[in-house]
Image (spheres, grey):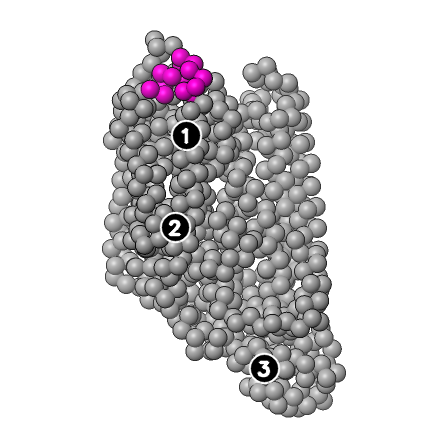
Amino acid sequence: MNLETKNKINDDLLRPVLHTSPWFYVIVLVLGGIIVAGLGSWMYQMSHGLVVAGIKWPVYWAFYITNFVFWIGISHAGTLISAILRLVNATWRRPVTRCAEVITVFALMIGALFPIIHLGRPWLAFYLMPYPSERGIWPNFRSPLVWDFFAISTYLTGSTLFLFLPTIPDFALMRDRTTGLRQRIYGMLSLGWQGTTKQWHRLESAMQIMAIAIVPVAVSVHTIVSFDFSMSPVPMWHSTVFGPYFVAGAIFSGIAALIVAMAVLRKVLHLEEYLHPVHFHNLGKLLLTMSLLWAYFTFVERLTVWYGNAPAEMAVFWETQTGSYAPLFWTMVFCNFVIPLPLLGIRRLRTITGTVVASSLIVVGMWLERFLIIVPSLAMKNLPYSWGFYRPQPVEIMITIATFAAMAFLYVLFSKFVPIISIWELKVGAHPRRVLTPQEEEEAQELWRVRP
Amino acid sequence: MKAVYALYADPDSAQLAVDSLRREGVAERSITVISSEPFEEYEFSRRDKPTWIFWLATAGGAVGLVLAYLLASTTQRLWPLVTGGMPIVAMWPNLIIMFELTMLGAIIVTVITLLITARLPTTRSKLYDPEVSSGKILVGVENAPDDSIEKLKQTLRATGGEVNAG
């Protein structure tokens, strides 16, 4: 790759950072307005109590916990996928990784907000943290909610660092390309990065180890979120398949969200030269695999319940198959499997448009899946005298909409201040790799010997 | 003592420059190569020593594991709460806390090791040129003796570099 090409990459990918379109302000204002409306709704709920939300006996977990599970699932788009692609050295990953890693960090932040919103009295959220208190109350380490705290904190810390480390060289690039206050800020963020061979080697070694560590953490996070349900003897929750079922669903919804985000970035930031149809094609194949896996898990879970024929479980089962929740259930099946299958399975249809349509439907379908796991089981728990119903209220709907706006808002801001495609990784991917001599191979092996 | 460096447009020339500096008797640790991307396939980018980062990360994980066990089991003993018929120190749920803190320990130690060994954060070294961001590769000699400056400049120029002295 010659210097002109490198400079073209720099210019193309720094353009959104260095030049601001008027549309940026319009988008920020619109999204900011929706977020303010959501915050207003939350404050209204705080002042009037949870009675303004639709949650009431026996359905105490509804929209907020659905959103919590959904956003934690979406967070699996990034770090997990990026780490796996990094470990298997998939060269096509390079323009995709940062788009994905950003989703993880913001989705985790938004997801972690929902248990706090759900508390009703968010100023008591610190009860979850392990600290010695004079009340003699410690978090119960046997509670899945405390496991959530540890899992999400670890994943958020790891994902933020996983996003930040490979961004350091790009911050250094921006430090050299900007002036004034911007230069000082990017200078601080770049930590004085020079790009010596030693720094590159250490960074790549650290990223390799981080990638190894982050994969099991990501798997554990959604498994632990599934434990919030499967540890309870509630009909259709107490299932051993819930862990892998949730992890598969999370990766499924995560890839779908990533495809949608990439398509928007490609169009809005004019990244057509970097986000090629092959990226959507390859992610589409992954999405197809996950769609099949999701269908398999749904079938296994439902068949086991149906075959067991336990009355309490069958009540929930039939309510979702043919009862009042059936329209939502069958919409979910169509969104997650029936429509995506041909769109992603037939090569001719696996275009950018095809994958985006399938992904958008899957995002909707996976939100419905979370809702259908949570609400019907609580509404029809065991004895019929304790059955009830749930209807979402405007406060919950507004807060839910606001979190989608918050995700878009954070993403827009990030792509305004940081190159959304890793510039140095993209350049590395364009190197025509020289064939090493046997001696060079041996030396390279020596260096890699202590690497994992 | 001052620094001498040259900028190269491609990694092949940078490799030639590094080889020439070696032939001139410049010590390996005095040669600096700075680029805006890693060039793993070139010998000049493999001059770093093997690192202990993997083993340090493992040690960080082990520390996290022990701390997690102590945190969970000690507090369970100090504030015994019977929950769902489980023992006071319930190892099955504690394994989850232990796993998470093990991974957190490994991740944090990895990052700390990176920062320390890569000497980050730091104020910018005198041997740097913003042209590196444009894709050029800097090959230089730090702390070159004054009497060797001209010789080094000639060597770097002979390999096609734009020579500068810092």
Residue A312 vertical position relative to residue A127 in the rendered view, above or below: above
- The front one of A17 and A9 is A9
Instruction: Tell me the element at label 3.
Output: helix
- Residue appearing at x 43%, y 51% in the figure: A100
- Residue appearing at x 55%, y 86% in the figure: B162
Q: What is the number of the mark on residue B13?
A: 3
Query: What is the three-letter code of the residue carrying label 2?
Result: Gly
- Looking at the image, residue A64 sits to the left or right of residue A227; the answer is left
**Residue designated by label 2:** A284
Magenta residues, start to end: A305-318
- Looking at the image, residue A299 sits to the left or right of residue B92; the answer is left
Q: Of the residues tagged 1 and 2, which is closer to the observer?
A: 1
Residue A116 drawn at (x, y percent): 42, 32
- Residue appearing at x 74%, y 77% in the figure: B27
Q: Chain of mark 3?
A: B
Query: What is the three-letter code of the residue carrying label 1?
Result: Phe
Find the distance from the CA under tag 1 to the CA under tag 3: 61 Å
How many residues crowd mark 1 within 10 Å: few (<14), some (14–19), many (20+)? few
**Residue designated by label 1:** A299
